[in-house]
Image: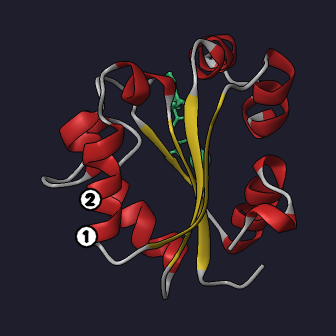
Amino acid sequence: MATNRTFTMLKPDSVEKGYIGAILEKINATGFRIVAMKMTQMTVADAKEFYAIHSERPFFGELVEYMTRGPIIAAVLEKENAVEDFRALIGATNPAEAAEGTIRKMYAASMGENAVHGSDSDENAAIESAFHFSGREMF
Ligand code: IDP
Ligand code: MG
């Protein structure tokens, strides 16, 4: 995986509230190319594996319940400096602390239900992309 890619999920709250189009519009307008994309639903086992790094945190059960309660949009995005630029576009984990104009400021309800995921490193972008997509599904 090249270092100019990142992985995102439009989380179940975004899908439930009908924000898919608006969020994808913002992603496109910021210059990201969509390399792979699908609607899917994580199983409990999937979510526990994907978020294994948080397994000891007090909110882990809540996080797994949230991320498995409905479908998500999973996508791989390409742009120069993709990981850092996408984290800037989505804003802080807690929408109350997210900058004006960021996706979480505009579409997230709370720290727990915060609309979108963005990889935090090139290494994790590659791992997370491979979790959801085979090589043949990335363009
Ligand atoms: P990030 O998504 O901004 O990278 P992380 O700290 O990696 O934030 O946490 C992963 C996800 O776990 C968050 O996006 C959010 O959905 C959830 N989460 C993080 N901290 C809390 C919390 O204090 N309460 C409830 N959920 C949380
Ligand atoms: Mg994170």
Q: Residue 109 falls in which quadrant of the image?
A: top left
- Where does the N terminus fall, quadrant-wise? bottom right
User: Nearest the camera: 133 or 45?
Assistant: 133
Going by the numbered disc 1, the residue's amino acid type is Ala
The residue at 66%/17% (across/down) is 68
Residue 113 sits above or below residue 130 on the image: above
User: Nearest the camera: 92 or 102?
Assistant: 102
Q: Which residue is mark 1?
A: 29
Q: Which residue is mark 2?
A: 26
Q: Residues within 10 Å of mark 2 (few under 14, many from 20)?
A: some
Where is residue 52 shown, x and y percent of the image?
A: 81, 35
Q: Which mark is drawn over residue 131?
A: none
Which secondary structure lies at badge 2?
helix
Is the CB–ligand 1 distance for label 1 below 8 Å?
Answer: no
Residue 4 sits above or below residue 29 on the image: below
Confirm whether residue 115 shows in the render.
Answer: yes
Q: CA distance from mark 2 to mark 1?
A: 5 Å
In the rendered structure, the answer to whether residue 94 lies left or right of residue 6 reads left
The residue at 68%/74% (across/down) is 139
The residue at 25%/45% (across/down) is 22
Residue 57 sits above or below residue 27 on the image: above
The residue at 33%/24% (across/down) is 110
The colour mode here is secondary structure
Where is residue 136 shown, x and y percent of the image?
A: 84, 66
In the rendered structure, the answer to whether residue 55 lies left or right of residue 103 reads right
Q: Residue 129 falls in which quadrant of the image?
A: bottom right
Where is residue 113 shown, x and y percent of the image?
A: 42, 23
In the rendered structure, the answer to whether residue 1 lies left or right of residue 100 reads right
Q: Would you say the residues marked 2 and 1 are in contact, meaning their CB atoms lie under 8 Å apart? A: yes
Going by the numbered disc 2, the residue's amino acid type is Lys
Q: How many marks?
A: 2
